[in-house]
Amino acid sequence: MTSKIRHITVDCADAYALATFWSQVLELPVHDDDHPGDPEALIEGAGLLFVTVPEAKTVKNRVHLDLQPQDRTRDEEVQRLLALGATLVADHRRPDGTGWALLADPEGNEFCVERSAGERAQ
């Protein structure tokens, strides 16, 4: 018998607030049963589960998400995510258009934004 990944779980200080950020990033809804103050919040269709824990984040993530924009360029997506509250941690974009941007969500969890499929095809 095999197993499948049901959720990718992210420990955080405020599950609903962080799920709301990622809901905007992914343009997917937070589960209807989840509300501010709840100890857990799920992004429907993404399998991302946010769980409130008492400990603060202290080190770099060992697992992170790599995002690939579907309907905009990497740089347009970076700008959109910064406007949503992400921060730029490290810029690995190169003058020839390759590379990626390393961002962090409002609680400091790192994630990358890569080039879109259209940009990769050029």
Image (cartoon, grey):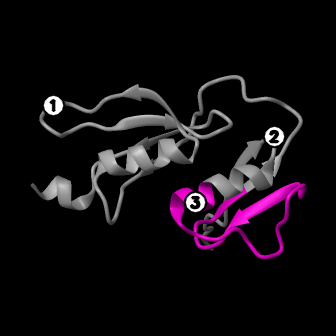
Determine which residue is flagged by label 1.
Answer: 95
Quick check: 40 left or right of 83?
A: right
| Amino acid, disc 1 | Pro
Q: SS for tag 1?
A: loop
Secondary structure mostly seen in magenta is loop
Q: Is residue 4 above or below residue 110?
A: below
Nearer to us in this view, 81 or 65:
81
Determine which residue is flagged by label 3.
Answer: 24
Q: Could you tell me which residue is drawn at 19 percent across and 54 percent down?
A: 119
Crowd rating for badge 3 (residues with CA inside 10 Å; few <14, some 14–19, many 20+)? some
Give the quarter of the figure containing the N terminus: bottom right
Quick check: 61 left or right of 89?
A: right
Q: Could you tell me which residue is drawn at 78 percent across and 55 percent down?
A: 16
Q: Start and end of the magenta stretch?
A: 22-49
Measure how far apart labels 2 and 3 are at the Cα level. 18 Å
Quick check: 1 left or right of 89?
A: right
| Amino acid, disc 3 | Gln
| Amino acid, disc 2 | Ala
Determine which residue is flagged by label 2.
Answer: 13
Q: Is residue 34 above or below residue 116?
A: below
Crowd rating for badge 1 (residues with CA inside 10 Å; few <14, some 14–19, many 20+)? few
Q: Which badge, 3 or 1, is on the more N-terminal residue?
A: 3
Q: Cβ–Cβ below 8 Å for labels 1 and 2?
A: no
Q: Could you tell me which residue is drawn at 84 percent across and 31 percent down?
A: 55
The location of residue 116, given as percent across then percent down, is: 27, 56
